[in-house]
Amino acid sequence: AKGQGRNRFCFYTADMNVQAMAQLELEAALRRALERNEFLLHYQPKVDLRSGRVVGAEALIRWQREGGGLEAPGRFIPLAEKTGLIVAIGTWVIDCACRQLRAWSDDGRPDLRLAVNVSGRQFASGDLADVVTQALARHGVAAAALELELTESMLMEDPEATIATLHALKRIGVKLSLDDFGTGYSSFAYLSRFPIDTLKIDQSFVRNLAAEPEAAMIAVSIIDLAHRMRLKVIAEGVETEAQLDYLRVRECDEMQGYLFARPMPADAFGCLLQDGARL
Ligand code: C2E
Ligand code: CA
Ligand code: CA
Ligand code: CA
């Protein structure tokens, strides 16, 4: 670099240093977290609106930092995405989810489905189908019990490649769902060509169901669209009875949200099942 001789320890301003250092530290901590097995999954129940019964869960990653608190994904997934670490983390998530499915099955609940979130980098990595196949085989789990939550933006990056990847996943037999639906920009043309099973209405529409006619209109349109396409539809972020009633009347299939339960550790989810909790 220029001026190396005179000022070699003064490349950056203090501010840039602090920011860059914090990121490097977090990245190193994330790598260690993988090695030390500091990640864990929490489970948020998915409930069938007709029967009121728990039909499965969404797995949501948490990071138990050594000597620290439990970090939510918003604190580390973005950097994991940026650095590519998300691919290794995602592989761990799929393996851990399959191990949990095995445990539920051994406990007499082979009917439960478990959904995992897939990141864009992981989806585009080229070996998602292999990772899924291996995890299912390793734990002896039926493919149909595993669901992958994908987002529209991830699928629309390269729609033709997406269609091939989705078909490879469907051949394995896993379920595919479109997360945060309504916030991206899928075209109807592609939507009909993506072999998906479920649309997941984004929380932003659910939150404003009662207060904003526009949000309610969009939610109803998504339910309608899903059913016309013979897809299942689930609402997430359901927090109030009013939202629930609305979704019931409109014949949404499933719900997920704080109204029923927050994401919880595996043992708490086991207790909830044991108690036969119902909506
Ligand atoms: P998401 O997939 O849209 O997950 C739903 C988020 O909403 C979760 O936040 C969940 O705890 C929260 N939530 C559930 N019910 C309610 C409710 O009734 N009200 C409100 N206000 N929030 C509710 P969380 O666990 O912090 O996860 C945030 C995001 O992080 C997820 O959004 C997902 O995009 C990402 N994420 C979580 N786990 C993973 C993972 O294993 N891999 C990847 N790639 N991303 C993950
Ligand atoms: Ca999700
Ligand atoms: Ca979502
Ligand atoms: Ca989201």
Image (spheres, rainbow, N blue to C red):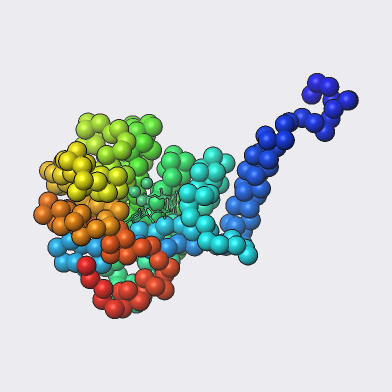
Asked whether residue 86 appears in the rendered view, the answer is no
- Give the vertical position of 27 relative to 158 (above or below): below
Report the residue at 73% width, 31% height from top. 12
Seen from the viewer's position, the closer of residues 274 and 95 is: 274
Which is nearer the eye, 102 or 254? 254
Residue at 38%, 31% (x, y): give it: 158
Residue lying at the far right in this picture: please name it: 5
Q: Image quadrant for the C terminus?
A: bottom left
Q: Position of residue 23 (x, y in %)?
A: 62, 43
The outermost residue toward the front is: 211
251 lies left or right of 65:
left
- Identify the image quadrant of residue 110: bottom left
- When the figure is inspected, residue 70 is found, relative to residue 31, above or below; the finding is below
Residue 60 placement, left or right of 187: right
Q: Position of residue 44 (x, y in %)?
A: 35, 62
Residue 129 image position (x, y, % from top left): 40, 48
Camera-nearest residue between 8 and 97 = 8
Name the residue: 24% across, 46% down: 208
Q: Can you tell which quarter of the image residue 214 is in?
A: top left
Quarter of the rendering containing residue 163: top left
Q: Horizontally, is 75 left or right of 31 in the view?
A: left
Q: Is residue 132 above or below residue 224?
A: below
User: For the N terminus, which image quadrant?
Assistant: top right
Where residue 131 appears, x then y in whole percent? 45, 52
Please indicate whether residue 183 sits to the left or right of residue 252 in the image. right
